[in-house]
Image (cartoon, rainbow, N blue to C red):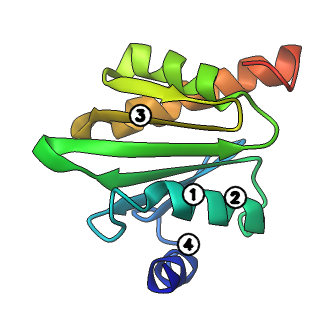
Amino acid sequence: LGSMLDWIYKNKDNRDVVRFGENCACIIGGDRIDENLISTIASMVQRSDFFGKKVVIGFGNAENGKVKVSARSEDFDMNLAVRASVAVSGGEAGGHEHAAGATIPGDKVDVFIDEMEKAFKSASQTDTNAV
């Protein structure tokens, strides 16, 4: 875990690794972050407040050209946001209010990120506890 976190922090200015939205920091782990550890990494980064964002979304390559997604936040309903985003990007989603995940097609990462930002913007305009 330490080497993965070091890699993220060292590459925080590399858009191929970390992408910032208005409300979120997206970690594009690719093959560098094991799909089975992306949830743990996303939780650790979100709790550290290193990026100063309300939401951290981690992406790790999975089998068959898919990408595993892990979203963490204390301020937004991740379950609703992830499910809404998967409805557009394709894939499967599940989770809880502060921690949710998905498996999406590998070529839909940007679509998923855009949809998550739309969900956060909508939530911010209405109620910060609902998406």
Mark 2 in CB contact with mark 3 (< 8 angstroms): no
Q: Position of residue 90 (x, y in %)?
A: 31, 20
For disc 3, the marked residue is: 102
Mark 2 in CB contact with mark 1 (< 8 angstroms): yes
Among numbered discs 4 and 3, the one appearing first in the sequence: 4
Task: Measure the C-alpha gap from mark 3 to mark 1.
Answer: 13 Å
Q: Residues within 10 Å of mark 1 (few under 14, many from 20)?
A: many
* Residue 78 falls left or right of residue 36: right
| Of 118 and 2, the residue lying toward us | 2
* Residue 27 falls left or right of residue 23: left
Local secondary structure at mark 2 = helix
Among numbered discs 2 and 3, the one appearing first in the sequence: 2
Local secondary structure at mark 1 = helix
What's the amino acid at mark 3? Ala
Task: Measure the C-alpha gap from mark 2 to mark 1.
Answer: 6 Å
For disc 4, the marked residue is: 13
Tag in front: 4 or 3: 3
Task: Measure the C-alpha gap from mark 2 to mark 4.
Answer: 17 Å
Among numbered discs 4 and 1, the one appearing first in the sequence: 4
Q: Quadrant of residue 120?
A: top right
Tag in front: 4 or 1: 1
Among numbered discs 2 and 4, the one appearing first in the sequence: 4
Q: Residues within 10 Å of mark 3 (few under 14, many from 20)?
A: many
Mark 3 in CB contact with mark 1 (< 8 angstroms): no
At x 80%, y 42%, the residue is 74
Local secondary structure at mark 4 = loop
Q: Quick one: quadrant of the C terminus?
A: top right
Point out which mark residue 42 bears. Answer: 1
Please say if 78 is above or below 28: above
For disc 2, the marked residue is: 46
What's the amino acid at mark 4? Asp
At x 32%, y 71%, the residue is 32
